Image (cartoon, rainbow, N blue to C red):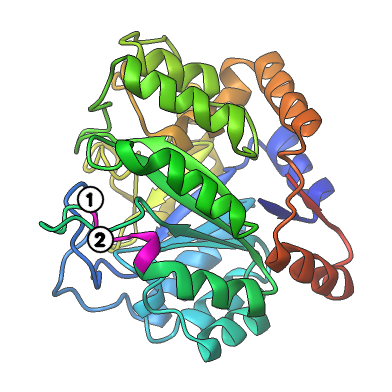
């Protein structure tokens, strides 16, 4: 993951207790209908750009480090480049996408808009006949090759570990590595955020990924392994503080799987709200497989463990990427933004 202005980001995280990552929903509509996903529909209109501008202004006031644009499928928003550009004024910007809407012209627009990171979901080598898994490497390889050639932002692939993907995971890891791209995996969870799988075969696949692939970090390695072994480690979720989920109506939720528990408009959200939530137990932590929430919460739960995980990734070379798109992007960002590093 590329971090712009690392000194500013660390200052915000350490001294201001600012949110590390905000997931901003810009459209609920998606061009796919994956069986394990609970975060899309096929009828909603995109959130109007003027509404998003006000929400992004509110996030900037809160000094958020990273804004992740999400859906649905964010790339189908007709003003996606303008949203990226507006967000990038005072934060770094990422997109989580299924990649199907990518084109040469859209990639160039995102380059010019200042996108920092793109996460492309690829769950298997081949799609399921019943379309439970639709984001397959067979379908997306041309899009990934296009990104490698043109993108000036960091690109990596992410996969969901579930019953339908487990038999193809090892080969998928090898194929993605062969393309010169980094990859991350996450265990599938249900609509409440709790893990849906466990057993030795999943533990072995988890271990295989961390042994054979090139992870960015090892922050959730031990935690994920324990979940897959059937354990339920104790921790305190920092959602509402270190992480925010802003839904399509502009309301802050704890996360995508805990809708309605907070529901405060982002334009009314304050530093006091952040400080009230970032160390408050949420009651749903046991068995939670929303690893992005766990990752951002570790700074409060186990600072030493966080340092050790980052150091292990550094020694393995996981913090720095060797993808062609990232090398191009790094050179461009050095010219455009002199304070950028990889974490």
Left or right? Give the position of 289 relative to 280.
Answer: left
| Front-most of residues 326 and 251 | 326
CA distance separating discs 2 and 1: 11 Å
Of badges 2 and 1, the one in the foreground is: 2
Left or right? Give the position of 20 relative to 283.
Answer: right
Which of the image's four quarters has the C terminus?
A: top right
Is 38 placed above or below 198 here? below
10 Å neighbourhood of mark 2: few (<14), some, or many (≥20)? many
Left or right? Give the position of 6 relative to 46.
Answer: right
Is 161 placed above or below 122 here? above
Magenta-highlighted residues: 133-138
Q: Which residue is mark 2?
A: 134
Q: Residue 73, image x and y in percent?
A: 33, 68
Q: Residue lying furthest bottom in this view? A: 105
Corner quadrant of residue 327 = bottom right
Q: Residue 301, image x and y in percent?
A: 56, 17
Give the residue at x 35% y 51%: 123
Give the residue at x 60% y 60%: 179
Q: Main secondary structure of the magenta part?
A: loop
Q: Which residue is mark 1?
A: 37
Is 290 placed above or below 178 here? above
How many numbered discs?
2
| Front-most of residues 112 and 321 | 321
Residue 163 in sight: yes
């Amino acid at each position: 993951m590329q971090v712009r202005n690392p000194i500013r980001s660390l200052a915000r995280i350490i001294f201001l207790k600012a949110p590390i990552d905000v997931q901003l929903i810009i459209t609920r509509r998606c061009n796919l209908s994956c069986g394990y996903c609970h975060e899309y529909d096929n009828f909603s209109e995109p959130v109007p750009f003027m509404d998003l501008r006000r929400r992004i202004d509110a996030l900037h006031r809160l000094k958020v480090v990273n804004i992740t644009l999400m859906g649905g499928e964010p790339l189908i928003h007709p003003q996606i480049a303008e949203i990226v550009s507006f967000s990038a004024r005072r934060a770094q910007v990422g997109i989580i996408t299924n990649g199907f809407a990518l084109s040469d012209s859209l990639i160039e627009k995102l380059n010019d808009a200042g996108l920092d990171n793109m996460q492309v979901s690829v769950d298997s080598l081949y799609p399921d006949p019943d379309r439970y898994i639709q984001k397959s490497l067979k379908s997306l390889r041309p899009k990934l090759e296009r990104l490698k050639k043109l993108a000036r932002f960091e690109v990596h692939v992410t996969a969901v570990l579930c019953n339908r993907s487990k038999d193809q995971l090892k080969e998928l890891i090898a194929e993605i590595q062969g393309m010169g791209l980094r990859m991350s995996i996450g265990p599938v969870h249900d609509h409440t955020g709790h893990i849906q799988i466990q057993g030795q075969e999943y533990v072995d696949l988890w271990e295989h990924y961390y042994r054979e692939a090139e992870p960015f970090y090892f922050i959730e390695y031990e935690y994920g392994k324990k979940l897959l072994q059937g354990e339920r480690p104790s921790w305190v979720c920092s959602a509402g503080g270190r992480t925010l989920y802003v839904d399509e109506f502009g309301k802050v939720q704890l996360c995508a799987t805990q809708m309605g528990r907070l529901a405060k408009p982002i334009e009314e959200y304050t530093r006091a709200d952040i400080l009230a939530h970032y160390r408050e137990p949420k009651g749903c932590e046991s068995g939670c497989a929303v690893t992005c929430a766990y990752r951002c919460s570790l700074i409060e739960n186990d600072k030493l463990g966080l340092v050790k995980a980052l150091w292990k990734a550094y020694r393995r070379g996981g913090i720095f990427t060797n993808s062609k798109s990232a090398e191009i992007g790094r050179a461009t960002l050095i010219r455009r933004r002199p304070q950028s590093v990889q974490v």
